[in-house]
Image (cartoon, grey):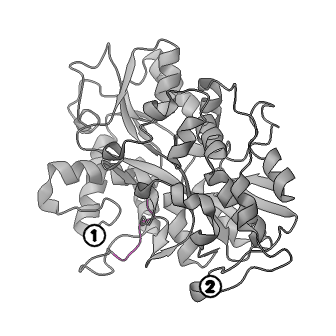
Amino acid sequence: MRYRRTALAGVATLALVLAGCGGDDDDDVAQATPGAGATTGSGTEGMATSLGAGEGQLNLVAWAGYVEDGSTDPKVDWVSDFEKKTGCKVNVTLGNTSDEMVTLMKSGKYDGVSASGDASLRLIGAGDVAPVNTDLIPNYKDIFDGLKNKPHNTVDGVNYGIPHGRGANLLMFNTEKVKPAPDSWSVVWDTSSPYKGKITAYDSPIYIADAALYLKATQPDLGITNVYELDDKQFTAAVDLLKKQRGIIGEYWSDYTKEIDAFAKGNSVAGTTWQVIANVLKADKAPIKAILPKEGSTGWSDTWMLSSKAKNPNCMYMWMDHIASPKANAAATEYFGEAPSNPKACNFTADKKHCDVYHATDEAYFDQVAYWTTPVRDCGDDRGEVCKDYSEWVKAWTEIKG
């Protein structure tokens, strides 16, 4: 379950320079809709083979801040021009958590969703989303290679969506309180820590992967190669580490305002964060620093996915191409506070340092990030189907928090 999106859009609003973030369009959209009046074909794997004219509307499930039409802020709009160009009227229902998004998509009322990695495989496995023919999305070719064909958006070589953006879960610490400056996640796992009671952590079952990531680096005998594919021994070790950490946690957070407030007041001095939250605190002159620790980190890359029951598939394809286009991708990811998925977007951000701050083009940086992926029973190797699936992560997280 995730709560990040509702929170982060608001943070980004505070952090961004909005000038120049007005609506945009994409000339390639028209190329994706040849054959007016045609319907979406069904090819191998149930994948569309051609597109027709837009159906006139588009119903989306999205994180707050991903589909802005000027209603939130007149300066923030990458939807209106899309509607004018395609004739697809966009309706959006906000999803507050990944679980909520999965439930909404099962209703069959929506054409697409901005799914996070802890939801995408659940949607694929349940047949709630359809394969996506990236040949019908001209801007897909420009997406970073590092975001294509990943475990959270591709199964058995079949692509199920278009990457939106990406980010890392960083270690943030108070530079006046935490000395010497840490370069390791050990500062949040040390049960004898002098910062006991002022350590914070992300409140979600997917945070179990953070424990696994630390164990992967510090206990190689566990043989952890993928922090989302944990067998019983590995999973138990991660859960045990989290239970021990519980004793030094001051508070878990899922609401950005709580973490900002906790660091601003000194109630938290070290813990997981996102770059955009660190930016807000720095702007307020808070003595903090955010780093990618030497063990690497977990992170996210959200995916726009097409409903298998979409009533407006042509409009959804047009939307996926639009959101991957340089201007729209720049506006959406800058507003939200993450790295864009299209490198050409860096030419259109209002803040010309945005891509540097978020390491947008730094693949070596993102090579150290394990993107959130829904845990499933299939370990993906010769261990077979003995790994803990997401339902077991949810159960364990409840036990960890007591």
| 186 up-or-down from 301: above or below | above
Residue at the extreme bottom of the image, as rendered: 44
Where, by quadrant of the figure, is residue 34 drawn? bottom right
Where, by quadrant of the figure, is residue 381 drawn? bottom left
Residue 179 numbered mark, or none: none
What is the magenta range? 373-378
Of circles 1 and 2, the one toward us is 2
Residue 87 lies left or right of residue 206; in this view the side is: right
Q: What element carries label 2?
A: helix
- Residue at figure coordinates x 60%, y 79% from the top left: 127
Do the numbered discs 1 and 2 sit on residues whose CB atoms are within 8 Å? Answer: no
- Residue at figure coordinates x 80%, y 62% from the top left: 58
Residue 94 lies left or right of residue 45; in this view the side is: right
From where the camera sits, is residue 7 visible?
no
Residue designated by label 2: 46
Q: What residue type is labelled 1?
A: Asp
Picture coordinates of residue 19, whole percent (x, y): 69, 25
In the depicted view, which residue is nearer to us: 319 or 64? 319
Residue designated by label 1: 231
CA neighbours of label 1 inside 10 A, class few (<14), some (14 to 19), many (20+): many
| Marks 1 and 2, the one that precedes in the sequence | 2
Q: Is mark 1 on a helix, strand or loop?
A: loop
Type of secondary structure dominating the magenta stretch: loop
